[in-house]
Amino acid sequence: MSTLWIPGAAGPLEQFVDRLQRRIADYAQRHGLEQVAVEVQLVDGALFAVKDISAEPGFGFVTLIPFDEPEEELIVPVGSVRRITLGQAEEKVARFRFTPPPA
């Protein structure tokens, strides 16, 4: 029987985060942006503007680093992530920015 990774289950989180960061970098490049506004919505409706996402601690959990709370780190089950939104970090609208890793 082959193994199928289902979002929300413990799986290759490092690959997930690496691919997510590549999508952010690709979005920035396609739109000519230095920084990208990234929002993560959880299944309970909580919405976080994040400046970084880490695959740690693993075992089905990721760490979100909120933009407006520099001393906080949120460790959440990857299955609790409902949606990740990428957008333009406009000065007038967005208070947060995610700088993609170098390509």
Image (spheres, helix red, strand yellow):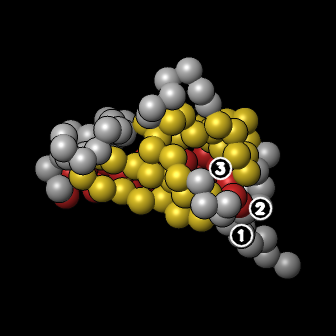
Taking the view exactly as shown, the residue that stands out farthest to the top is 71
Q: Is residue 4 left or right of residue 26?
A: right
Q: Residue at x 54, y 34 (%)?
A: 65
Displayed quadrant of residue 72: top right
List the residue tagged with mark 2: 9
- Mark 1–mark 3 Cα distance, whole angstroms, equals 11 Å
Cβ–Cβ under 8 Å for marks 2 and 1: yes
The image shows residue 52 at horizontal and vertical percentages of 48, 36
Q: Is residue 35 left or right of residue 53?
A: left
Cβ–Cβ under 8 Å for marks 1 and 3: no
The image shows residue 29 at horizontal and vertical percentages of 21, 51
Taking the view exactly as shown, the residue that stands out farthest to the bottom is 1
- Mark 3–mark 2 Cα distance, whole angstroms, equals 10 Å
Q: Residue at x 69, y 39 (%)?
A: 75
The amino acid type of the residue labelled 2 equals Ala
Q: Is residue 31 left or right of residue 86?
A: left
- Mark 2–mark 1 Cα distance, whole angstroms, equals 6 Å
- In the image, which disc is placed on residue 6? 1
The image shows residue 99 at horizontal and vertical percentages of 33, 36
Q: Secondary structure at mark 1?
A: loop
Q: Is residue 54 left or right of residue 49?
A: right
Displayed quadrant of residue 56: top right
The amino acid type of the residue labelled 3 equals Leu
Position of residue 26 relative to residue 8, above or below, is above
Circle 2 crowding by C-alpha within 10 Å: few under 14, some 14–19, many from 20: some
- In the image, which disc is placed on residue 13? 3
The amino acid type of the residue labelled 1 equals Ile
Q: Residue at x 51, y 28 (%)?
A: 69
Q: If you read the primary sequence from the N terminus, does the residue marked by circle 1 or circle 3 appear first?
A: 1
Q: Secondary structure at mark 3?
A: helix
Q: Secondary structure at mark 2?
A: loop
Is residue 12 visible in the rendered image? The answer is no
